[in-house]
Image (spheres, rainbow, N blue to C red):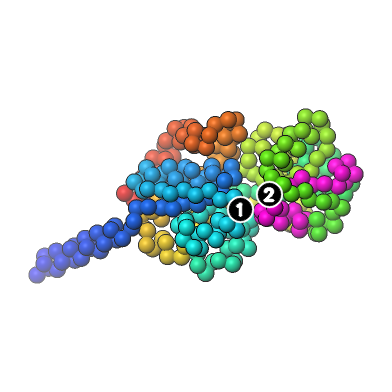
Amino acid sequence: MKALVKLCAALVLTVIYSFSAHAESGVVKVGSLAWEDQMAISQPTVKFLEKQGFKVEFTKFSEWGIAFGALQHGDVDILLSSIDYVTSDYWAKYKNKLEKISVASYGVRQGLVVPSYMNIDSVDQLNTVSDKVGGKIIGIEPGSGLMREAADALKKYDLKYEIIDGSTAAMVAQLQSSLERKEPVVVTLWEPSWMMQKFDVKFLADPKGAFAPPQGYYWIGQKGWSEKNPRARESVATVYIPKDDITAIAGDMNNGKTVDQAVATWWDKNQKLVDKWSVMSPK
């Protein structure tokens, strides 16, 4: 009798497992912004999911509003984001329809940066050099969390400045030009970034806390996705890219490699880490 009970229990578990495996589609729709730090995390994750046997449909977004809209409507299953601060507004708006899946990395920081040769070290000293930089802070794309925080800094510190929005490429060009001429300049910047490796610059201290403290990168998804896709969820959750590795991948991209080439270079150098992911991730 006991043997029969054990046999029945085993059959039930087999049926449940088979049903769960059948229910999980094997396709993961991944979303990420096209920014260097985001791509340096999302692309190794895509590569690992494919290694685990999943078919991945990848979508790049130009800005957060579009990305979160796509996630809540199901155009993507999971999205890489920084919901503590950078995208906290979008998370607050949509969180009833979404869920946290896992932490993908940690240490993203953003703020105001000046060349190391400038004789200031804090945001509250910026008004002393306003005339030297034309009263301008060179920003990036409008609508980003960094630009929002920069605007908050103007109010908190009563800065006599105008924030010039535009693009990351335009900001980089202005920063590089100013450094080559040994001229003063104030820009918005973040790390991890190849720019912090290449350029001799420093973050200004932020005693009033206008900018967020170091924060994490999260994979988030539609509510219920993890429950419906347990194997995919565990595969995503086992991937963690250290901040220095993000910088290295982004640096290779800046030096002329494609995203795929930069990720392949990192992947080949970090096979021991990838093998650990494979051990922890279910087959």
Q: Which mark is residue 63?
A: 1
Segment tinted magenta in the rendering: 129-153
Residue 170 location, quadrant: top right
Q: In which quarter of the image is the N terminus?
A: bottom left
Horizontal placement of 21 versus 50: left or right? left
Compared to 172, does 54 lie above or below?
A: below
Residue 165 place in picture, x, y as percent: 74, 49
Q: Which amino acid does label 1 sit on?
A: Glu
Horizontal placement of 167 versus 127: left or right? left
**Which residue occupies 79% across, 34% down?**
178
Looking at marks 2 and 1 on the same chain, the residue that comes earlier in the sequence is marked by: 1
The answer to whether residue 10 of the structure is visible from this angle is: yes
Secondary structure beneath dot 1 equals: loop
Q: Nearer the viewer, residue 57 or 86?
A: 57
Q: Do the residues labelled 2 and 1 touch (CB within 8 Å)?
A: yes
Horizontal placement of 9 versus 235: left or right? left
Residue 10 place in picture, x, y as percent: 18, 62
Compared to 280, does 249 lie above or below?
A: above
Residue lying furthest left? 1
Q: Which amino acid does label 2 sit on?
A: Glu
Q: Which mark is residue 251?
A: none
Q: Residue 141 carries which label?
A: 2
Looking at the rendered structure, the number of numbered marks drawn on it comes to 2
Compared to 10, does 271 lie above or below?
A: above
